[in-house]
Image (cartoon, helix red, strand yellow):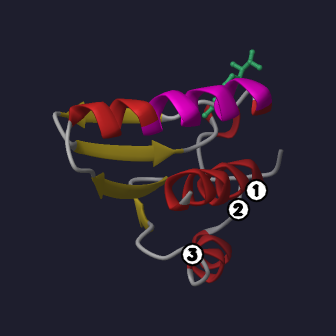
C-alpha cells in the first residue's frame, strides 16, 4: 500500500467530516452517551478491523473515543486508513 502525501490526505479528508491529519495519522474524537455505547461501537469497529486486517490506535476514556489511523508498514497514511475511516463513519452512523 502506497503512502499518501499530505496534499492527498487533506484532499481525501474533505469528504470525511471531523477527521484531521496529525503527526502522520488521521484522527477523530467521538463522544457517546455512556461507556456501554462507546464500547459497543468499539466492538463493531474491532470486527471490521479484523475483516480488513487493519487496526486502529485508539484511546477510550468512559464515553470518549479517540481513533488514530495510519499504516505501520509505510509509516504514514494510505488508502486503507481512509477506507477504514469511512467504515468507522458508517458503523457510528447506524
Ligand atoms: C502482519 C499484518 O498484516 C500487519 O501487521 C497489519 C496488521 N494491522 C495493521 N494495522 C495498521 N493500522 N497498520 C498496519 O500496517 C497493519 N498491518
Judging depth in this view, the residue of 16 and 81 nearest the camera is 16
Measured along the vertical axis of the image, is residue 67 above or below residue 44?
Answer: below
Q: Earlier in the sequence, mark 3 or mark 2?
A: 2
The circle drawn on residue 79 is 1
Q: Earlier in the sequence, mark 2 or mark 1?
A: 2
Give the magenta range. Answer: 41-51
State yes or no: discs 2 and 1 in contact (Cβ < 8 Å).
Answer: yes
Residue holding disc 3: 13
State the image quarter where residue 14 is shown: bottom right
Q: Main secondary structure of the magenta part?
A: helix
Q: CA distance from mark 3 to mark 2?
A: 12 Å
Which residue is found at the position 56% from the left and 57% from the top?
Answer: 94
- For disc 2, the neighbor class at 10 Å (few under 14, some 14 to 19, many from 20) is some
From the Cβ of disc 1, is ligand 1 less than 8 Å away? no
State the image quarter where residue 53 is shown: top right
Q: Position of residue 10 (x, y in %)?
A: 56, 78
Residue furthest out toward the right:
1
Q: Position of residue 72 (x, y in %)?
A: 61, 32
Residue holding disc 2: 4
Give left or right: position of 80 versus 18: right
Q: Position of residue 47 (x, y in %)?
A: 65, 27
Amino acid at each position: 500500500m502506497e503512502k499518501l502525501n499530505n496534499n492527498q490526505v487533506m484532499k481525501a479528508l474533505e469528504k470525511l467530516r471531523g477527521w484531521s491529519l496529525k503527526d502522520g495519522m488521521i484522527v477523530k474524537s467521538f463522544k457517546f452517551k455512556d461507556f456501554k455505547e462507546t464500547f459497543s461501537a468499539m466492538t463493531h469497529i474491532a470486527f471490521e478491523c479484523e475483516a480488513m486486517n487493519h487496526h486502529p490506535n485508539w484511546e477510550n476514556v468512559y464515553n470518549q473515543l479517540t481513533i488514530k489511523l495510519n499504516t505501520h508498514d509505510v509509516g504514514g497514511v494510505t488508502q486503507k486508513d481512509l477506507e477504514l475511516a469511512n467504515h468507522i463513519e458508517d458503523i457510528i452512523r447506524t
